[in-house]
Every structure is written in structure tokens, then in C-alpha cells.
Image (cartoon, helix red, strand yellow):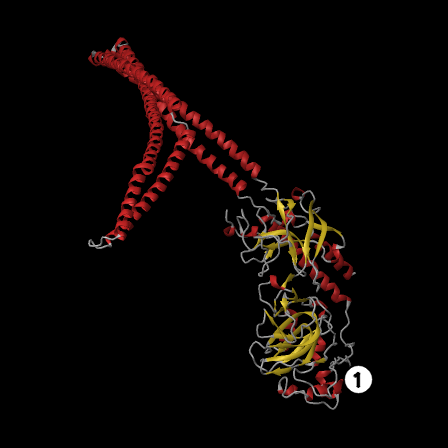
Amino acid sequence: MKRFFALLLSAAMLSALAVPVSAAEATYKVADVSQVAYIEDDDGRLDLSGSVSRVPYGETMYFPLLNGGASGIDDAYTAYAAADKAYGTAQEATKTAKTAQEQKQTAYNTAKAAYEAANGDTTALEKAVTDAQNKVTEAETAKTKADGELTAAKTEQTNAAAALTDAKAKQTANAVPQATLDSLKSAQDTAKGQFDTASAELTRLEGLVTSAKAAYDAYSPADTGEAIKTAYDAWQKAVGDRDAYKNGAYASKESAYAAAQKAYADAQKTNSDLAQAVTDAQSRKDKADAAVSSKQQAVTTAADNVTKAKETLKKAQDNLNNAASATEAKAKMDAALKELEAAKKTYTDAQTAESTAKTKMETAKKTYDDLKNNRYRYVYESSAAGDASAKASWEENSGRYLGNPTIKKIRVADAPTGATSSAMSYIYCVAIKVNERSSTDSRDVFGEITVKQTKGDRENRFEDVVLDLAIEIGYKSSSDTDVGEGVIPEKAAIFKKGDGFEQDSEFIFEFEADPDSSFVVNTVGQGSITLGMTTDPDEDLYDDILDEYPDAYVDFFNGNYATFNRTGTLYLAPSDGEDNYYVYSVDEDGDVARVSAEWDSSEDAYAIKTRTLGRYFLSSERLSNSFLSSINGTSSSRPSSGSGSSSSSTGSGDLVVVPAPTTPSSSSSTPTYNPPSSSSQASSSSSSSQSSSSSSSEEASEPEEESSAPEEDPSSEPEEVVDVDTDADDSDGPKKGGSALVWVLVIVGLLAAGGAVGFVLYQNKVKRQDDGYSQYDEYDDDNDFPDDDDRH
């Protein structure tokens, strides 16, 4: 009976937790989903600075949910339109009040003047009439003068226009055509060429004269022979030839060239003079146009002055004519003053109302502009998307490579445009995990993901939105990682000949995550292979070790289990460079086994012969077989470090015997894994293998107490076998009594009731606030950011 009562009470209390609490309407509701993918950065935040077209295996791609605009933008526009209309009305009211004040001022001035006149002194009124008449005369005289100047300006404008037309006509009629100019220029050039040729010829003849004279002058005056006579005749002939050419052909060419130059220059001057005449006429026309415009304005101004002067005269005459008795005039003046003061107050009030209306309009406009121009595109409120779900319809077997889509809230790297609080940096997305694979191929995946919300508050539900997924998945190539050839990155990449490694009998791979460790292997004939390695601790395993061995220091080396064609040497370097560590492997099931690895002093690292870059760790403390047995077999909750070629599972607590890096003796047998067994079932072949392998080492591979000396009997070394817990279950312990169950259920019911009451009270307190994360970025889907974190 007690148990039945407890069950009923528990059910009632737990059902209280399901009482719906009215949720606030979301500011940003789901309207669409982004069709481009984004991935997390190194800090685990979503990088919205650039979308991706290819997603590596093992990564999660995110497609942000998009809103259709803030729900308050329509209200903000309505408020802005109303405020703007009110401001316009206030402006009109101010103008009307100002006009009324001016009219009342004029009426008061008139009444005051009439009172002064009726009080017995009309001298001022008469003088005002005389002055007004004089102003009218002056204004009319100025108007007459302005009219005359305008007429003269228009005459000059007509004459200037005629002169411009004449200049253009003369230019058209008398200008030398371009073809003629070109012909004259050609004739000048031809004449110059001929003159230059004639000048050269004359120069040559001058040279002959000089040479002949020099030949003649070379003879002595005493010489009377035939030779001096011949020289003299040659000189004279040269002089004659020169003079004949100079006065004949040369002079003709010189004259023709001078005539051609003059003809061309005259034609150019003619055109230049005609063009200048047009320019001068145009300048005169422009000045005349400007003068007419100026004089026209002067006439308009003079006419306005005449009108104003006549109005002033009329008022002065009216004031003089309207002079009445002092008592009546005083009453009119006082009444006019009272109306003037009322009009002034109305005008002042209108100005104040206009200023207030303007401030309200500007505030409303800013609110609307902020929502319109700095539009926040995403969805961050749990009331808007917290109950949303996603369902995929895959095409072309794409579902083999992708996980099921989920709706996930994730922090973005930088605050999005339009975000006004820290909460808005956590947005809802469609999240799709790309399955882990060791494949070196990339592929396109396709599908249709439908996002819907059928639960939650109805006012926040939305029509289904669809993501048409079409994207490439696959690892980057080594050359795209920017870590250098032969360096295995933290995030897996594809290595192949010429892109990541070269074919070499001893190619050295280094690790981005641990530059002190390396892998040396023969890559001749090696095909494409996916490689990745990190040193991130396995949190669960690390916590288990520290719980048992608080002083342990552990270094992790997490390969992706990629397997090479040939066996190589993996060098694992302790972070402190010491050689007092124990080496352990972690298979793909998460089971841990001891590895016999030799210390290589030249590399300052432990050397392991292997084809597979799996997971290892170095521990400063030796882990007991019982401890290994306790953690092995519970590895299903410990995620594997990556996918790749499978490696051998060694069973719980086994010591994985791996050959030392030095050359083994001829008697060494092939290294094997010890199968799981009790100490009484160890095989002799395993013992032989371990003994021969250990004997080939030149020095101890691990701490002294773990010497790899040959063993007579595998069962004598407890560490090399599984420490099986053979204790029977404790059947003598207390039985589970019914009374204990009753009290447990009663306590659960009371806690549920208290939680329900507290939950409802708290929801009523914060139901109108935005939800999000706390100041310390610890996400609470129901709580809000504090007010001091809002950035409106």
C-alpha cells in the first residue's frame, strides 16, 4: 500500500513539471534556412565570415535558421509614420500661429498710431504720409531708370547676336578648307625637301671649290708648268659650277620653298583670324546676355519697391484718416494689445509642440531605421526554434555518409550584424555531421532537409522551411593544409606521391601537433592515404588514469589508424625528453594495452615498429593489469580518435610486443600480440617471441623495473596477462527491500513538487525577457541575459 501511494504521489509531482508556462512571443521567428554551409573554427565557434563548399569527413556542417525580420518592424514603421504626420501637423500649426501673431502685431501698431493721432498730435502721422510719398517717387524713378537700362541691354544683346552670326558666316565663307591646308602643308614639305637637297648639293660644290683652290695654292708662285695651269683651270671651273648652280637651281628651289611657306602660313592666319573673330563675337554675346539678365532682375526689384512704397503710403494715409477720439482709440489699442499677447503665447506653444513632435519623429525614425538597416538575420530565442526538428530525405545514398540532421544552438565567432545583446551571438542551425571515413575520395551528397515546429507556443510556430542540400564532402589534400610537405596535420588530409610525400626508402613524416615525434617509412609504391594526428588528451581515459595514479604524467598521440603498405618506425617523444615512461596503445575499440618500445637516444624518443598510425600514450606510471582490466571493456563510452584502416585488437590488459628499432637477431621470431588469457593459459610461443625480441635490445627500453629481459614463463610476469577479476558477486549484501523503494519514491515526489513550484515562479518573473546565455556563456535555455548585458 505504501509503495502504491508513493507511486501515485511521484506521478502527480512529476506531471506538475509538465504544466505549460506561457512563453513570450519571439522577436525573431523562423522564416527560412540558409542554403550555404558553415563550419566551426578552432575554438568550436561557428565562423560566419565565409561559407564552405567542401566539408571534411568527421566535421559538422551548419546551416543557420533565418528570420523574416523583427516582429516589431511593422509596428515601428506605423509609429514612425504617425509621428512624422504629427510633426507635419505641428509645423503647419506653428506657421499659422506665426502668421496670426504678425497680423495682430500690425493691428496693434495701427491702433496705437490711431490713439496717438486722436490724442491731439497728428504731426507724426502727417510726416509718415509725406515720407511715404517721397519713397514712392524714389521707387518709381528707380524703376524708370532700370527700364531704360534694360532696353539698352536688350539692344546690345541683339547687336551682339547679329555680330556673332556675321562672324560665323564669314568663317564659313572664307575659312581655308582643311583639305587645302593639308595640300599647302604637303607642298611646303615637298618644297622644303627639294630645298634641302639643293642645299646639300651647293654644300658639295662649295667643297669642290675649296679642294680645287687648296690644290692650286699648293704650287709655288715660281711654278710655270702645265700642272699649275691645270690646277688653276680646275679651281676656276669649280667656282663657275658653284656659282651657276647657286644662281640657278639652288635659287629656284629656295624661292619655291619660301613661296610654299608663305602660302601655308597665310592660310593658317586666315583661319586663325576668322576663328578669333567668332570667339570675340561669342564673348560679346555672352556679356550682353548676362547684362540683360541682370537688368531684368533690377527692373523686377524696382517694381517690388514701388509696390511696397505704395503700400506703406496707403497705411500712413489710413492711420491719418482713421484718427478718432482718444477714449475710443485707447480702447481699440488695449484690445489689440490683448489679442497680440494671446497670439504670441499661441505661437510660443506651437513652437514647443513642434519641437516635441520633431523629437518624437526622429526617435521613431531611428528605431525603424535600426530595425530596417541593421537587420539581424538569425534565430536565437528558444521560443522561436527550441522545439524545431529536422528530417532528411537523402538522394543517391547520401545518407551513408551523413548523420541525421538536428537543430543545434551554437555560438558564433563574431557578433552578427544587428545583434544588440550577447544572447544574439548564439544562433539555431541545422547541424549535419559528416561521418568519419578514411577514404581518399571526395563525393557530392544531396538531400532535402525539412525543418518544422509542431510543438511549443502556437504564436511562434512557423511554416516548414526546406534546405536543398548539395555539397561536396572529403578531406583536404596535403598541399591545402599549409603545414608543409611531409607534415601530418591535426585535421586529417589526403597524402599522395608528389602531394604530401615523395617516394623514398626512408621518408620522414613529421606531425603538426608534435614536431618532436616522427614516422619513418618506405613510401616507394605507396598509394594515396588519409593521415591525421593530434595530442589532445582522451578525457575519460585521462581521468581514469589520474583517479588511480594522481602523480602520473601522460602524453597522448592520437593517430587516425591509417595503415601504410610497409612497416615503418614511429618515434614518440615525451614532452619532457625523459626516458622514464611506459608506452601504451589504444585500439579502435578504446582498449588499452602495454607496448614494448625501445628508447632511441639519437631521437630522444621511443621507437615502435608499425604499419598503422594508431593511438598511443606515454605514462610516467606503470599501469597495473588490474587497472587495465577495469578500464577495458568500458570503452564503448569513449569515442575513437578517428577512422581509418583497422588495427589488431589485443584484448584487455595484454602487452603488445613490438620489435625494437635495432636489427633483430636471426633467431627472433615474428612479433605477435599476446591473446587474452589467464596466467595459467599463456602460450609458449608468445613467451618465445617476447624473449627473442627483448634479447636483441642494447639497453632497457622502459624504466628499470620493467626490464625486457628474457622470461622463463609468461605466467611469471603478471603485467603481460589480463588481470581477470575472479571474485564472485557479493551475494551476502543487503537485499533491495520494498520499504526503501517507497521512501525513494516519496523523496523524488517531494523534490519534483518543489522544482515545479520554483520553475513556475521563475518563469512568471522572466517570461517577457529574451532568452539566451548567462554572462559567463553557460547556456540556460530558459534563463535570460542580465539587463546590464543588453546592448540596445
Give the residue pinned by disc 1. 681
| Residue 692 visible to an observer of this rendering | yes
Q: Nearer the viewer, residue 730 or 545?
A: 545
Instruction: Please name the amino acid that badge 1 sits on.
Output: Gln
Rendering coords of residue 47 (x, y %): 58, 55
Q: Nearer the viewer, residue 728 or 139?
A: 139
Rendering coords of residue 549 (x, y %): 62, 78
| Residue 334 visible to an observer of this rendering | no
> In which quadrant will I find the N terminus?
bottom right
Vertically, is 278 above or below 135?
Answer: below
Vertically, is 776 above or below 348?
Answer: below
Q: Does residue 78 appear left or right of residue 470 in this picture?
A: left
Q: Residue furthest bottom?
A: 712
Quarter-wise, where is residue 196 in the image? top left
Identified at 34% across, 34% down, the residue is 256
Q: Nearer the viewer, residue 412 or 727?
A: 412
Rendering coords of residue 125 (x, y %): 23, 13
Q: Secondary structure at mark 1?
A: helix
Specify few, some or many for label 1: CA neighbours under 10 Å numbering under 14, 14-19, or 20 or more.
Answer: few
Quarter-wise, where is residue 554 in the image? bottom right
